[in-house]
Amino acid sequence: MLGVRAGRWRRVASQVGRSVTVWAVSTLTMLVLAGILPDFRIQSVDGDSATRIAVTAAFGAGAFGLLSALVWPLLVRLLLLVPALVLGLLVFFLNGGLLLIALRLNPAERGDAAPETAVVVAAVMSAVASATGAALAVRDDDAYRRRLYRLADRRRRGGGAACPASPGTVFIQLDGVGHDILLDAVGRGLLPTVARWLGAAPAAPADAGGRRGPTHRLTPWRTDWSSQTGASQLGILHGSNHDIPAFRWYEKDRREVMVCNRPTSAAELQRRAVEATGDGGLLTADGASRGNLFSGGADEQALVLSIATRRRSRENRSRSGYFAYFSDPANAVRTAMSFVAEAGREIGQSTRSRVRKDRPRVSRGGLYPFIRAFATVVERDVVVAAVMGDMLAGRTAVYADLVAYDEVAHHSGPFSRDAEKVLERLDRSLALIENVAEHAPRPYRIVVLSDHGQSPGETFRTRYGLTLGDLVRAGCGLPVPRRARRTHSGAEARAAVRAALHRPVEEGGEQYRPSSRRSEPIVLASGNLGLVSFPDVPHRMSKEEIDARHPALLTTLANHPGIGFLLVRSEEHGGVVLGPFGAEIPLDELDDDPGPLADFGPRAADAVRRTHSFPHTADIMVNSWYDPAEGEVLAFEEQIGSHGGLGGAQAKAFLLSPLALSAPDEDGTQLAGAEHIHRVLRRWLRETDGPQVPLAARQDRRAA
């Protein structure tokens, strides 16, 4: 009993000591700022003694600290319906307002600051106080545990039910990181956390018997023909990516261009997948979805695109997501500083690239530095904080997407130094999540995976001076613009920015309205995959119909050196693959004679046949040229690291799983397709005693 009381008193004394130290550092910070900033004073106009100034600073620092601890969490909860980015900006002004209130509370009324100065002072003081508290708490495991718990919204939706003893599972998606890129980064020491998990680092952990070895296994998997986040993540989270032929495509029956990172399209694709499977998704049982295109059936969601157009309500807002991050105003300060630094870093890197005349190279001006900074800083920080909150709340299944690498690799190249730096920072995020797992109320198994890779290469427009749309128009006998226009990039980070702002800006218009005259073809690009549709023909045109209407089109495309192969419907064979020099291979003969698919790998024929079966496959599917020796493709978008079609590393993703889980390929079959990955993840959730709730049962429960 005496030992318990002594331990309790030691903890109290330690907490009091840390609070006094933080208070003292905050007081000193306020004194320094008062001496530096002309519009901030903590003494009367006539001047005060040093002692009185110090007392005033101590009072102001203490009052500001108390207001931040007591009032700030209430303000954040009141503003949970505000978009994430807007809330991040409001943090600074609200924090400055709290400082002004703290100064007014001084009975002597000696403190004052201009409103804009108060914002700066409050930001600096919050950052210093947070850093001091973290530095002191990290020396004490109990204090560190309590600090991590305060980051989470611990009020469970079920009303405080006991946390299960069975393991939870965290799925971290490293967007666009291919299997070979991961292995190369591990070998070069860029990913020390992943290397330790694979037993490839000198400091690999020892087990209970003192033996060192890997804790995870690395398994490659092949994507579908549409090697992009929309198709992969929909299949992984919802078990079906049927009828997703590309990142963007035209649906003749709806007269609409579907784009995977458009909020309205994402919501419709998720609805179709749920209808096809009869199940809400991978995360329906006590799950959380963070930074994804789709919800996976989770009740807790943050930065999820498919709900971005829905009216914000208690049902679809995410307290544990945003509150875990913004409940500490220092987080917004730190992220804002990192955001500015990252934008400046991108401007410097792109300038050096232009000066060196690097090739290949794409434009990186306009808003791109800020979009990159959002993807690599803001989105990462908010998503990681949300995952931490989910783990400390004991949630059963969490799926989070970190898009940082994919965004940078699109513009700098998948093997660039810029992209390598992003990988290093992502590894630190994995280390932080691993550290939080040690303090969670239940054990956690961390699974890391990717949705696709990226293939390098210059753009089609750069190499040939025209876009795919220009080439199609020439083959149709239509006038071609004298200057090739840039195609729109489909990078996921732009959609994440719109989701964070709740501003679902639609790309290119929601509906296609053909003119009264004969309609021109719609040409869309998805990485190195192109789609050509004739909107005035209600059905998918056959090769024979296309030849009758535009006799030179298919020949022009198939024989162009930047084109690898075409897929079209055939009245005689059902479907055929076209290549240069008159190559025409029926789909059912590709296994014996792959023809133009020979360089694209042994599973290319299966991927092409599956896409041919989709109802909304384009009239002409165009895959770019591929160089198997260099692994290069030609993107139809403005990207020097691309994905979306067949060819090279873009189709080879990875799955990094704990050895405690069964081998993903235990049935002896190669992992191929996102739907296969969904079945593997489902199996792992069952192994960790995390059964999924069928959609009907979940709806009945909500109705009750």
Image (cartoon, rainbow, N blue to C red):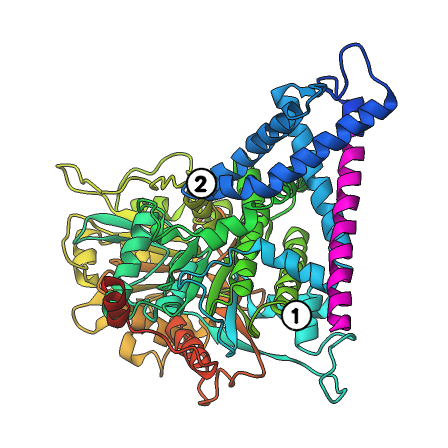
223 and 699: which is toward the camera: 699
Q: Is residue 331 left or right of residue 138?
A: left
Q: In terms of depth relative to the viewer, which is nearer, 365 or 16?
A: 16
At 66% from the left and 29% from the top, the residue drawn is 120
Is residue 487 in view from this perspective? Answer: no
Where's residue 673, x and y in %?
A: 40, 73
Q: Which mark is residue 194?
A: 1
Mark 1 or mark 2: whose residue is earlier in sequence: 2
State which quarter of the image contains the C terminus: bottom left
Q: Secondary structure beneath disc 1?
A: helix
SS of the residue under disc 2? helix
Q: CA distance from mark 1 to mark 2?
A: 39 Å
Q: Residue at x 73, y 64 (%)?
A: 8
Q: What quarter of the picture does the N terminus occupy?
A: bottom right
Q: Is the residue marked by circle 2 packed among few (<14), some (14-19), or many (20+) residues within 10 Å?
A: few
Pointer 1 and pointer 2: residues touching (CB < 8 Å)? no
In the image, taking residue 694 as reference, residue 70 lies left or right, namely: right
Residue, disc 2: 78
**Which residue type does callout 1 highlight?**
Val
Q: Which amino acid, mark 2?
A: Leu
Left or right relative to 148: residue 607: left
Residue 625 visible to the viewer: yes
Instruction: Determine if the magenta segment contains residue 395.
Output: no
The answer to whether 329 is drawn above or below residue 300 in the figure is above
Tell me the quarter of the picture where residue 448 sits. bottom right
Q: Quadrant of residue 370?
A: top right
Q: Is residue 587 above or below residue 309?
A: below
Task: Please give the range of residues in magenta.
Answer: 1-30
Name the mark on residue 519: none
